[in-house]
Image (cartoon, rainbow, N blue to C red):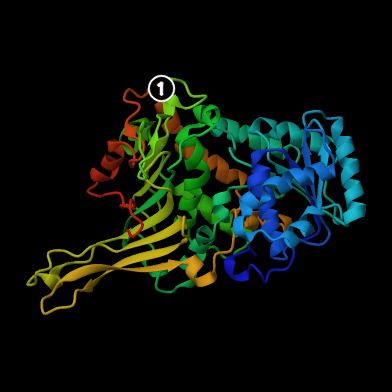
């Protein structure tokens, strides 16, 4: 069972295990993984028989590694920091210097893990976390396999967590999956997406299928269209080199937005078991109608930000002025798609996806726009039309659910106004500190892959966007930069909906 806000403090501790972090000296370990373990420790969800073994090139001992992690833990957990919790966790942190590309070093790793089994009672259960560049995934798994560290028995388990990107196109993603399967069974591979650790993403399933008034309306008869937005106000910062190779489309849509779409559009699974959930998500991806080369020209939009002013007045430079970025870069920092599905539930309902950097606000949300009600009732009143209802699932910030509907304005005449209902997780369940990794790490320790991606899901996602990547590679953009920093993207993104008589939901202000 996945860890949710309601059962956070009621769930049992995870199973005994040793968590090996490859790339332990990196940014991901300091900012996300160790803080997530801190929060799990605070909630009593880490077992007593537990160890973290950081692995990296830097030569240091356990105490030096603990000191290094302690230097920044306060910054990343904020007011949630509790010295007694940290002292409990830090005693479980260990370190080993090794060259992860050198096969001979894995014999030393095997010996160190055997020692931790004895010292910490980790029972031979190993969770290998790949906090390293994707170019090292196959090398590390190959070395682990050769050292016998991936073989499971009836008494222990071995699992590996792989961070995105999972390839950079369909061909490379399939090659990566083949390489992983050369040393691991699919059930041992946990492809992580931190978006799926957020409460609202998990709550999509509960909201849809646990509420009798929602599911009957969740189809083409009542829904006009769906908008998925992942907007970032930050630029590429120090990741210019990576972003030049990725771009907004590769970075966000196959990995994040399409899986969100899967949760929104899937049929009811038979259970919360991971296989049932993944199967329904994959059915959604199978139903998405392929984009031909001609479709890409009218149903896909790309953009790149230029210099501009953010809403707080900060003047920021253009993408092409960022470190590591070519002065004539054709890389998109904004991407939008119009997708449709060929299935009974969603035939004729467009799904609009957009993501970008240096946009006007930091927002991740899913907006469900219902069809407009008939106005015949109001033909002899001052009401000319009624606004369509919108349901918004806010993923970040301020996770929650927002609903707008029409009501009569008080007074002697018939006037209609739009009112809002708003549910915020913090108001109802408190604001438990989280990085988005807590649920995912806990689930992996317990063998629950519900919120992780299957090999088929990865490849289907790349298959959907492959034609877009091919067309964009063949036709370099002529108008970059085509939107100013601090706006909502290029004009063509508005036309994507405008040509259908629709508008992007206005999310510039907090009360919309």
Q: Considering only vertical position in the picture, is 241 above or below 186?
A: above
Where does the image place residue 459, in percent across and percent down from the top left?
56, 40
- Farthest left residue in view: 380
Where does the image place residue 272, in percent across and percent down from the top left?
60, 64
Quarter in which the C terminus is drawn: bottom left
Question: How dense is the environment of label 1, judged by Cα within 10 Å: few (below 14), some, or many (20 and up)?
Answer: few
Q: Quadrant of residue 23?
A: top right
- The residue singled out by tag 1 in the image is 474
Where does the image place residue 496, in percent across and percent down from the top left?
29, 41
| Residue 134 in sight here | yes
Position of residue 457 in the picture relative to residue 94 (left or right): left
Q: Considering only vertical position in the picture, is 484 above or below 351?
A: above
Q: Nearer the viewer, residue 181 or 29?
A: 29
Q: Nearer the viewer, residue 194 or 285?
A: 194
Total of numbered circles in the picture?
Answer: 1
Position of residue 119 in the picture relative to residue 43 (left or right): right
Q: Residue at x 65, y 65 (%)?
A: 1
Q: Quadrant of residue 406?
A: bottom left
Q: Residue at x 49, y 35 (%)?
A: 250
Q: Residue at x 40, y 27 (%)?
A: 472
Q: Nearer the viewer, residue 39 or 74?
A: 74
| Residue 291 in sight here | no
Q: Quadrant of residue 407?
A: bottom left
Q: Considering only vertical position in the picture, is 99 above or below 78?
A: above
Q: Secondary structure at mark 1?
A: helix
Where does the image place residue 336, in percent across and percent down from the top left?
38, 40
């Amino acid at each position: 069972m996945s860890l949710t806000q309601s059962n956070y403090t009621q769930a049992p501790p995870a199973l005994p295990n040793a968590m090996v972090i490859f790339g332990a000296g990196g940014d991901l370990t300091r900012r996300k993984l160790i803080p997530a373990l801190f929060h799990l420790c605070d909630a009593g969800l880490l077992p007593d028989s537990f160890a973290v073994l950081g692995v990296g090139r830097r030569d240091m001992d356990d105490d030096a590694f603990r000191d290094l992690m302690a230097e920044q833990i306060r910054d990343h957990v904020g007011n949630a920091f509790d010295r007694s919790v940290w002292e409990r966790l830090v005693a479980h942190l260990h370190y080993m210097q090794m060259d992860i590309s050198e096969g001979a070093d894995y014999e030393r790793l095997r010996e160190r893990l055997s020692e931790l089994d004895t010292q910490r009672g980790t029972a031979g259960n190993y969770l290998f976390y790949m906090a390293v560049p994707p170019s090292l995934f196959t090398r590390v798994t190959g070395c682990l396999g050769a050292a016998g560290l991936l073989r499971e028995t009836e008494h222990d388990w071995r699992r590996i967590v792989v961070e995105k990107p999972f390839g950079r196109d369909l061909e490379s993603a399939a090659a990566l999956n083949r390489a992983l399967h050369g040393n691991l069974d699919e059930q041992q591979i946990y492809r992580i997406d931190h978006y799926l650790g957020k409460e609202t993403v998990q709550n999509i399933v509960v909201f849809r299928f646990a509420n009798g008034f929602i599911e009957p309306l969740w189809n083409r008869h009542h829904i006009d269209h769906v908008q998925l937005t992942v907007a970032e106000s930050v630029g590429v910062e120090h990741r210019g080199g990576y972003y030049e190779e990725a771009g907004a489309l590769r970075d966000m849509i196959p990995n994040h937005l399409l899986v969100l779409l899967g949760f929104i559009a899937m049929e009811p699974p038979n259970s919360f078991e991971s296989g049932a959930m993944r199967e329904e998500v994959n059915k959604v991806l199978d139903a998405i109608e392929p984009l031909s080369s001609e479709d890409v020209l009218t149903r896909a939009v790309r953009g790149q930000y230029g210099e501009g002013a953010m809403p707080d007045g900060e003047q920021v430079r253009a993408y092409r002025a960022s470190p590591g970025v070519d002065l004539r870069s054709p890389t998109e920092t904004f991407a939008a798609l119009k997708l449709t599905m060929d299935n009974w539930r969603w035939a004729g309902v467009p799904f609009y996806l957009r993501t970008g950097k240096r946009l006007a606000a930091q927002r991740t949300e899913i907006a469900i726009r219902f069809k407009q009600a008939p106005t015949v009732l109001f033909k002899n009143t001052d009401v000319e039309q009624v606004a369509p209802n919108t349901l918004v699932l806010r993923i970040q910030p301020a996770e929650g659910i927002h609903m707008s509907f029409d009501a009569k304005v008080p007074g002697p005449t018939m006037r209609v106004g739009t009112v809002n209902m708003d549910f915020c997780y913090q108001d109802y369940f408190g604001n438990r500190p989280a990085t988005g990794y807590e649920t995912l790490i806990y689930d992996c320790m317990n063998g629950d892959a519900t919120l992780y991606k299957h090999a088929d899901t990865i490849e289907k996602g790349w298959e959907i966007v492959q034609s877009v990547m091919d067309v964009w590679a063949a036709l370099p953009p002529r108008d970059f930069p085509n939107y100013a920093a601090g706006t909502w993207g290029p004009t063509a993104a508005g036309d994507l909906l405008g040509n259908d008589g629709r508008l992007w939901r206005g999310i510039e202000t907090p009360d919309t």
